[in-house]
Amino acid sequence: MLDQLQNNFWISPWTMLPVILLIILAIFKVPAIPSLGLGALSAVILGWIHNPNISINSITELIMNGFVAHTPNKNINLLLSKGGISSMLTSLALIIFALALGGLLIKFNIIGVIITKIEESVKGIVGLTISAALTCIGVNLLVGEHYLAIILPGESFKEAFDHHNLPRTALTRVLNDAGAAINAVVPWSVSGVFIAGTLRVNPLDFIPFAIFPFLVTVLCILAGFVNVIKKKA
């Protein structure tokens, strides 16, 4: 397989330049769109340097439709043949629709009312932790965006955590565990759609194996009991 890769493709440390460029831009906190654009442009320039006979039309077609490998090895063809921008349009459309629905729920204050009602019914530290975690999960299910699943419950529950003399780090743990991690196992969420589209796996097939999101959420709730014990001590 290595011989076939070397015979059919340009394997060189120079091909790592786009990845290194992305890492450098991320370290300097350059916005995502310019970073990805510069990374793609550097890859195009490298490809043109290696094969100066390639036309702009061919490069554009590769970006839009992806690359199809034609080697004697079927495994190599399967590994390296990937779609371009057009292959992600279905996933992108689903993400846009999910965010649009989330925008409507926020605009009409439906999310805010639900969070307020949950917050009013909270009693005790354990109940507060469970309510915050369930709210994060609920926002993920309704909106499908983990940023909102962190921001909305965070703004709503921070005063309640202060009232119970709990550190803000406890709230941060809940938001990270139930807000960010759970997003990956919501099929219509941004993370769920990306994973399903990239791996080409039905979300319902990989969810049973996604132990980490469920485990950290359970540990997050158990931490609420630990806080009760510490407070009594």
Image (tube, rainbow, N blue to C red):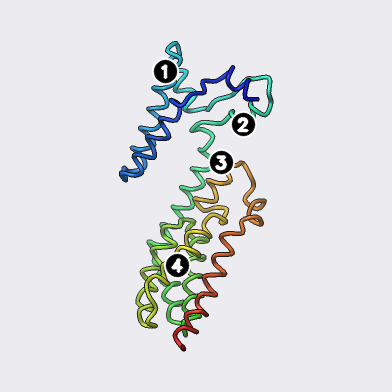
**CB within 8 Å, label 1 to label 4:** no
N-terminal label among 2 and 3:
2
SS assignment at label 3: helix
N-terminal label among 4 and 2:
2
Q: Which mark is residue 48?
A: 1
Label 2 vs label 3, nearer the camera: 2
**CB within 8 Å, label 3 to label 1:** no
Judge the density around disc 2: few (<14), some (14-19), many (≥20) Cα neighbours within 10 Å: few
Q: Determine whether 172 is above or below 159 in the image.
A: above
According to the picture, the residue beneath numbered tag 4 turns out to be: 173
> What residue type is disc 2 on?
Leu
Q: Which mark is residue 79?
A: 2
Q: Is residue 83 left or right of residue 170?
A: right
SS assignment at label 2: helix
> What residue type is disc 4 on?
Arg
SS assignment at label 4: helix
**Disc 4 versus disc 2: distance between alpha carbons?**
38 Å
N-terminal label among 3 and 1:
1
SS assignment at label 1: helix
> What residue type is disc 1 on?
Trp
